[in-house]
Image (tube, helix red, strand yellow):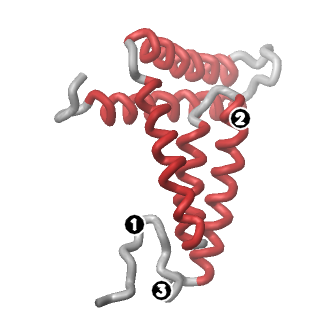
Amino acid sequence: MSTERQRPGYEADPATAHPVARVAFGVAGTALIAVGVVLLVLPGPGMLLILAGMVLVARAVPAFARFVEPVRAKAMQGVEASVASGWRIAGSLLAGLGLIAAGVAAGLLPDLPLAGWATGASLILSGLILLGLLAWSHRRVHGPGRSA
């Protein structure tokens, strides 16, 4: 009998993981977790970023992997709720398009407060991320092989 347990895909094997890679995963994961916590109170995909950060930290610190599954379950509940009705989808779609429009306006209209392409690019990127996550969530919940 083998004493080796099956590791989840996101958990690092300490014997084969390069120390520099483990540090990089830990730092990137911690940053994503910090941003995700902020986005729990601000509009944004907070739970998904926390999940992504936890997966990266679990690749750096194998003992951390046991905390990933409960967060994954909670994040997937949020994904399902975000596309549960047409009104929620429409609201998210309008928010994403509004962010992109605000970014273009910030870049093209220098008289606006905090205007400029740095602000505009961050707003446009935020809108694109929101639309991308909305499409991913919709495909995951309502995609082929799923009952709608």
Upstream in the sequence, badge 3 or badge 2?
3
| Residue drawn at point x = 53 percent, y = 69 percent | 59
* Real-space Cα separation, disc 1 to disc 3, in angstroms: 14 Å
50 to the left or right of 77: right
| Residue drawn at point x = 46 percent, y = 24 percent | 82
The label on residue 16 is: 3
Quadrant including the C terminus: top left
* Real-space Cα separation, disc 1 to disc 2, in angstroms: 37 Å
44 to the left or right of 55: right
Upstream in the sequence, badge 1 or badge 3?
1
67, above or below 142, in the image = below
Front disc: 1 or 2: 1
The residue indicated by pointer 1 is 9
Q: Position of residue 40 (x, y in %)?
A: 67, 34
Amino acid at the residue labelled 3: Thr
* Real-space Cα separation, disc 3 to disc 2, in angstroms: 41 Å
